[in-house]
Image (cartoon, rainbow, N blue to C red):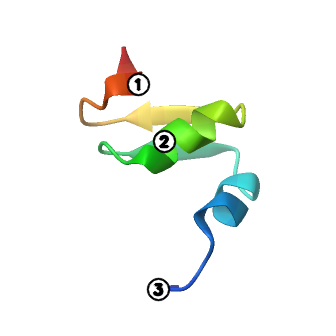
Amino acid sequence: MVTDANILDCIQAVDEVHTMASLAGFEALLRGKTVYCYGSPFYAH
C-alpha cells in the first residue's frame, strides 16, 4: 500500500474512481473522470 502518494497524481493516472464519500471523488469529477459512489457524498446527486 502506498501511503505517501499525491491524490491528484493518482486521479490523473486512472480512468475511473470508486469511493464511499471521499472528496477524492469530487476532485475526480472536476477532472472529467467517471466516479462511482457507494455512499452519499454531496456530489452524488
Q: Amino acid at mark 2?
A: Gly
Q: Position of residue 3 (x, y in %)?
A: 48, 85
Question: Which residue is located at x 49 percent, y 49 percent?
Answer: 24
Secondary structure beneath label 3: loop
Q: Which residue is mark 1?
A: 43
Residue name at image x 51 percent, y 37 percent: 26
Relative depth, front residue between 4 and 36: 4
Q: Position of residue 33 (x, y in %)?
A: 67, 36
Whole-Å distance between the Cαs marked 3 and 1?
Answer: 27 Å
The C terminus lies in which quarter of the figure? top left
- Alpha-carbon span between mark 2 and mark 3: 19 Å
Q: Nearer the viewer, residue 7 or 36?
A: 7
Disc number for residue 1: 3
Residue at horizontal 75 percent and vertical 54 percent from the top? 12
Disc 1: CA contacts within 10 A as few (<14), some (14-19) or many (>=20): few
> For the residue marked with disc 3, what is the amino acid?
Met
Residue 31 appears in which quarter of the rendering? top right
- Left or right placement of residue 41 versus residue 8 in this view: left
Q: Residue furthest left?
A: 39
